Amino acid sequence: MSEWARSSKLEVDREVYMEKVKFQSSFEELKFEAFLQKPPRKLKVHSWSEAQRKLVLPQPAAQPSRATLTSSSHFGISTRKYLPAGVAPPGSTYPREEPRESVHLAQLPLPALQAPPQRERRWAGGGRELGNCTHRAGAPRATAMAMSCPLNRYLLLMAQEHLEFRLPEIKSLLSLFGGQFISSQETYGKSPFWILSIPSEDIARNLMKRTVCAKSIFELWGHGKSPEELYSSLKNYPVEKMVPFLHSDSTYKIKIHTFNKTLTQEEKVKRIDALEFLPFEGKVNLKKPQHIFSVLEDYGLDPNRIPENPHNIYFGRWIADGQRELIESYSVKKRHFIGNTSMDAGLSFIMANHGKVKENDIVFDPFVGTGGLLIASAHFGAYVYGTDIDYNTVHGLGKASRKNQKWRGPDENIRANLRQYGLEKYYLDVLVSDASKPSWRKGTYFDAIITDPPYGIRESTRKTGSQKEILKGMEKCPESHVPVSLSYHLSDMFFDLLNFAAETLVLGGRLVYWLPVYTPEYTEEMVPWHPCLRLISNCEQKLSSHTSRRLITMEKVKEFENRDEYSHLLSDHFLLYQGHNSFREKYFSGVTKRIAKDEKSSQQ
């Protein structure tokens, strides 16, 4: 026991108290621990009730919460005590706080409490603490975060484009930056407004530095289905969280954002004036304010039935904008070197985010084409590498894909594309290679494999080979030999891709690729499976009324073994996988039927 407690008239029996009390939150326990080990001042107490009052100790709860028995000997205490599951034992590094004389800690709203400092540290028992969040080894991460983190609520304003890709992108990026997707919303569908719980503002800012599916993020101060509910919610928001942004030395402005409805300037001013009850003390600055606040109104998704009153109203402090401008600045229309199937810039960045690409990663594309996916990965600081079977594409030779240009220029190649965006330093190399041939030594080389295999529509599916049963060895072929190319079935292509990813990805690395499907026959069982890879997401992009392609994201969860190479042959869905081989025929049969239907209708 510390010196100050020994000198007081009443020595607090800590061991007895810790056995009896059940803290109403993990942070109350941390405050008690910090106070016992580093008291702000000496206190003289004459009774147990006075000790509880002056130390601001939480009262024992009537119904004890579920707890896990853990040892506390590594803190210099020989007793055993109860801690909520997933909460790290408190250390002496937490900041001291002045005791509250008149207000009981348990009576204070949780958001009003000051959170422990952002840091990472390890403690006995195999756990780790990330920021304010503790994850104990062997405990579910969701439980650890929910119990030990005072999560703040944020409002995401999403773009109404590529709707199915939005949720997997946000989940992947939160996971990349040490957060977790936690939300009270049941569905996300087509709504542009998402409410998330995020551990810190830093994670929210990092999220917006990467996402192309979200427009903006706000710290949510209030939310309601009517103006009255919104104002009531704002009045209940902790004042101490507002004060840093409303003090007299600050400047601010308030913006009105509506979805599916346009307001007049008079209506906007009326909504701003209704917020006069908020303690704004700073000056209004419409050009360069320090803080921007927004009222966001949701009028639903049907432009033909716009309601008089909004379905939901939100008020929050603007934190950051997303990276939507990348779609325009990296547009294929402005790119130096393009091909028939160059990937759209927005989808390229979405694929990189699904793959959790980060700085100093090595990203590989086995069907590199003109390198559009490499550019998106290099933008996020990854070193990029690729292969392709087409010699002319790799070397930038042959006919041009651009209108009014017959032949490709002398400096049209993948490296020139990266140089165009100032990313040449991330370029490793691009080789002419056959994805069906095992040309790599055994080992794990890549942090992510992001690719768009050919579907046999605009670009043919090819591999090297011979019609002869006995193949000539490469040692018998001259250096100038050009191998014969054969048709490469889609099912074989995808299984070769999954095997390659399982062999060469690092553990936890991701494979992101496009799978073309014939919509009337598609089932989830048609998605290729591998024992070393876990399916993360499966998103659809419509190509026509009867075809689509699905963005498949998989993560490596176990090391590759030789027996895993032919695991797909033992799958119950092997015959379903073979259905991908006829995608080209089904695609063009649908086109033929549509043309015949159009001609018939025009004749009538």
Image: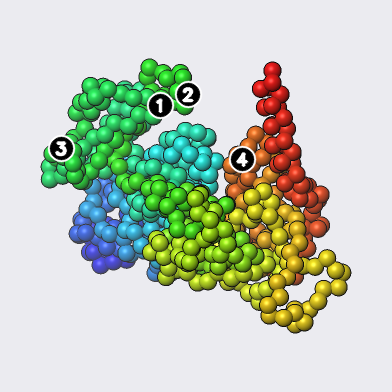
**What's the CA distance linking mark 3 and mark 2?**
35 Å
Q: Residue at x 71, y 24 (%)?
A: 600
Q: Amino acid at mark 3?
A: Val
Specify which label sits upstream in the sequence, 2 or 4: 2
SS for callout 4: loop
Question: Could you say which disc has been placed on residue 543 in the image?
Answer: 4
Provide the residue designation for mark 3.
284
Find disc 1 in the rendering and name its residue.
260
Q: Horizontal placement of 53 versus 158: left or right? A: left
**Given this view, does label 1 or label 3 mark the residue nearer the observer?**
1
Which of the two discs, 3 and 2, labels the residue nearer the N terminus? 3
Inspect the image, locate mark 1, and give the three-letter code of the amino acid beneath it. Asn
Residue 231 locus on image (x, y percent): 29, 27
Q: Quadrant of residue 237?
A: top left
Inter-mark Cα distance, 2 to 4: 24 Å
Count all numbered tags in the image, as a single digit.
Answer: 4
Residue 38's mark? none
Q: Are marks 1 and 3 in contact (CB under 8 Å)?
A: no
The front one of 242 and 289 is: 289
Which residue is the site of mark 2?
302
* Nearer mark to the viewer, of 2 and 4: 4
Q: Classify mark 2: helix, strand or loop.
A: loop
Which circle's residue, 2 or 1, is located before the other in the chain? 1
Location of residue 23 in the rendering, given as x and y in whole percent from the top left corner = 40, 48
Using residue 437 as the reference point, say whether residue 292 is left or right of it.
Answer: left
